Image (spheres, rainbow, N blue to C red):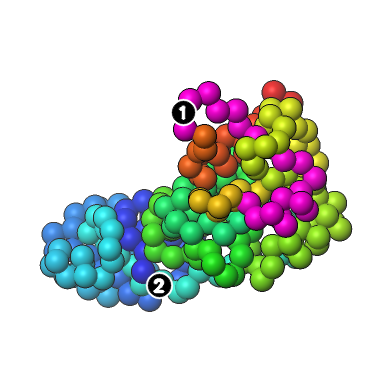
Amino acid sequence: MYIYGKNVVKSALEAKNKINKIYLSKGFDDIDLLNGLKNTNLKFNYLEKYEMDKIVDGLHQGVILDVEDYKYADISILSDKEDALIVMLDHIEDPHNFGAIIRTCEAAGVDAIIIPKDRACEVNSTVIKTSTGAINNMNIIRVTNLNQTIKYLKDIGYWIVGTDMDGTCYTKIDYKGKTCIITGNEGKGISELTLKNCDFIASIPMNGKVNSLNASVATGIIVFEAMRVRNGL
């Protein structure tokens, strides 16, 4: 898998990700990154910009790494976390949304993000780039069935908070204790069955003509409200 961009590469070096190959544009002169990359003891492959552009479809800033595929965390880690706050994504498809959600969750101190294996965006180069390296500090768990996972979470003491237009104002919900916040698909929202399995439904009041928010924005609003409540602010 390729990762690219200065911030992402810096984060990968700090996290000691396994690197297979290093590609740099001719004339690359970021001294700090060059020094960090030298510590890998790998050969630098210098390429023309157009050659770099063929490797990845994104703003690489002159540096691309070939790294091992992302390793997902195991759901068993959630049983050991006291008062954990986690986010579940109900078939988010846009890698930019996914990456932005990872960045927001990491900034808020969320313990893990759960995604489904089918009909959803996986961790890829675009997700990692959009997260600006935050993914190295976040547990991403990939599961086969979201509703079976919800049942498992309830069995180990989690409250499940879904997000939908028809629910309780998000500021009126108590997010203390083990809590899982669910964000729905960009177009369809949370599936009907998943909504039925939620303990609470949180809604964000809309005062304008637009009746919904981008998935990453909505997640950020509710996640930071949850952290505010949990911190007693």
Callout 2 environment at 10 Å: few (<14), some (14 to 19), or many (20+)?
few
Dot 1 amino acid type: Lys
Q: Earlier in the sequence, mark 1 or mark 2?
A: 2
Is residue 7 toward the left or the right of residue 164 in the image? left
Does any portion of residue 230 appear in the rendered image? no
**Looking at the rendering, in which quadrant would you find the N terminus?**
bottom left
Towards the viewer: 177 or 193: 193
Tell me which corner region of the image, top left, top right, bottom left or bottom right, holds residue 127: bottom left
Q: Which residues are magenta?
A: 190-210
Towards the viewer: 178 or 183: 183
* Membership of 196 in magenta stretch: yes
Decide: is 232 above or below 62: above
Where residue 209 is drawn, which disc sits there? 1
Callout 1 environment at 10 Å: few (<14), some (14 to 19), or many (20+)?
few
> How many tags in the picture?
2
Decide: is 119 above or below 201: below
Dot 2 amino acid type: Met
**Looking at the rendering, in which quadrant would you find the C terminus?**
top right
Mark 2 lies on residue: 1
Tell me which corner region of the image, top left, top right, bottom left or bottom right, holds residue 151: bottom right
Is residue 227 toward the left or the right of residue 102 in the image? right
Q: Give the residue drawn at x 57%, y 59%.
A: 91
Q: What x and y, as percent, mark residue 221? A: 57, 34
Q: What x and y, as percent, mark residue 140? A: 59, 60
